[in-house]
Amino acid sequence: MSQGSIDAGTLRGMLGRDESLVVVDVRKREEHERGSVPGAVSFDAYEKLSAGEERAMEGLEVPEGARVVTVCNRGRAAAAAAEQLRKRGHDAVHLEGGMDAWRSSS
């Protein structure tokens, strides 16, 4: 686990303990609908994040004090999303390895 990320096992544990947590799936909405982390909120920012847009996560509302875990397919876009959220003052990390890691950890 690197700084700014968590692994799938850690995320599963956090979800099991009902921690104050918001999981944000930044993939395209269609991908989210085909399967995501249980309870994840869809926030389609993948194209903007991939293009390096610094405001890709604007418009996402997060409850005050909640930890945010961003998710994409492999982790790169989610890492950029988490970085943007940290710059806005949120406690944000990304799922290391993305949905690929999530699926293989079940």
Image: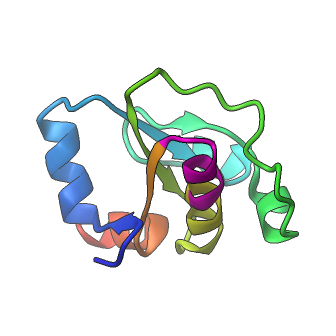
Q: Residue at x 47, y 37 (%)?
A: 40
Q: Is residue 106 visible?
A: no
Q: How many marks?
A: 0
**Residue 85: in magenta span:** yes
Does residue 56 sit above or below 19 in this rendering? below
Does residue 81 sit above or below 66 in this rendering? below
For the C terminus, the quadrant is bottom left
Q: Is residue 16 visible?
A: yes
**Residue 100: in magenta span:** no
Stretch in magenta: 83-90
Does residue 32 sit above or below 58 in this rendering? below
- Describe residue 41's horizontal placement relative to residue 13 as left or right: right
Residue furthest top as drawn: 63
Q: Position of residue 16 (x, y in %)?
A: 14, 38
Q: Quadrant of residue 77?
A: bottom right
Q: Quadrant of residue 47?
A: bottom right
- Describe residue 63's horizontal placement relative to residue 65 as left or right: right
Magenta region, main secondary structure: helix
Q: Residue at x 73, y 51 (%)?
A: 28
Does residue 39 sit above or below 92 in this rendering? above
- Describe residue 10's horizontal placement relative to residue 93 as left or right: left
Q: Position of residue 52 (x, y in %)?
A: 84, 69
Q: Residue at x 80, y 50 (%)?
A: 56
- Describe residue 46's horizontal placement relative to residue 71 as left or right: right
For the N terminus, the quadrant is bottom left
Q: Quadrant of residue 53?
A: bottom right
